[in-house]
Image: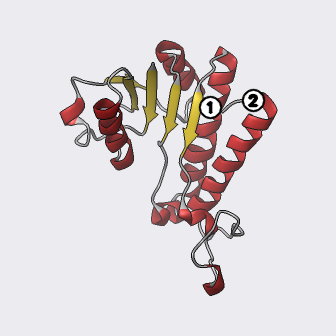
Amino acid sequence: MRALITGITGFAGSHLADYILENHPHVEVYGIVRWRSRTENIEHLREKINLVEGDIRDYISVKRVLDEVRPDLIFHLAAQSFVPTSWKAPQETLTTNILGQTNIFEAVRELGLSTAIQIAGSSEEYGLVKEDEVPIKETNPLRPLSPYAVSKIAQDFLGYQYFMSYGMG
């Protein structure tokens, strides 16, 4: 079994790789890295994982990586995830988070892979939470307050749409 982690060099991605390697030794772990990715979070894993250069914002790159790796599982953690940055660079945030995920879905679909895809949500999707809505439930209304939050809602809806339209999951 092969697992591909987008965003493997980040905090969550590197910890997920640690977890998989420790608890599921039969799983081959792959990760997408960009040429300028900081790799200090995965230095201790270098000999245990397979790194493939790619950029989720580039469809051709994504398709090449997925065709090479042919993963059974994709943990999609790559994102522009800093709320303040989303205000300074909303286009980059939306492109990375929404189009990046679309590239993954479309490449999986075009290659005919039957890959399970896990996408990461964020509490930012709920945005404005009223006092009487605490603790937050999944049924809470979505009231995003940043471009980042909007991008995470779009990712959730894309996941739902691709599941309903194409049976991807």
Residue furthest front as drawn? 23
Please determine whether, in this image, residue 67 is positioned above or below residue 93: above
- How far separated are the C-alphas under marks 1 and 2? 17 Å
Residue 103 appears in which quarter of the rendering?
A: top right
Please determine whether, in this image, residue 166 is positioned above or below residue 120: above
Residue furthest left as drawn? 44
Residue at the image position 63 percent from the left and 23 percent from the top: 108
* Residue type beneath disc 2: Gly
| Residue 9 visible in the current orientation | no
| 59 relative to 30 in the view: left or right | right
Residue at the image position 63 percent from the left and 76 percent from the top: 128
Q: Give SS at disc 2.
A: loop
Task: Look at the image and tell me in which quarter the N terminus lies.
Answer: top left
Residue at the image position 59 percent from the left and 29 percent from the top: 116
**x, y percentage for residue 142?**
69, 66
Q: Do tag 1 and tag 2 residues touch (Cβ < 8 Å)?
A: no
Residue at image mark 2: 167
**x, y percentage for residue 147?**
60, 61
Front residue of 57 and 132: 132
* Residue type beneath disc 1: Asn
Residue at the image position 39 percent from the left and 25 percent from the top: 30
Please determine whether, in this image, residue 137 is positioned above or below residue 119: below
Residue at image mark 1: 103
Task: Look at the image and tell me in which quarter the C terminus lies.
Answer: top right
Mark 1 vs 2, N-terminal side:
1
Q: Give SS at disc 1.
A: helix
Front residue of 152 and 37: 152
Task: Tally the marks.
Answer: 2
Residue 63 appears in which quarter of the rendering?
A: top right
| 93 relative to 5 in the view: left or right | right
Query: Which numbered disc, 1 or 2, marks the residue closer to the eye?
Result: 2
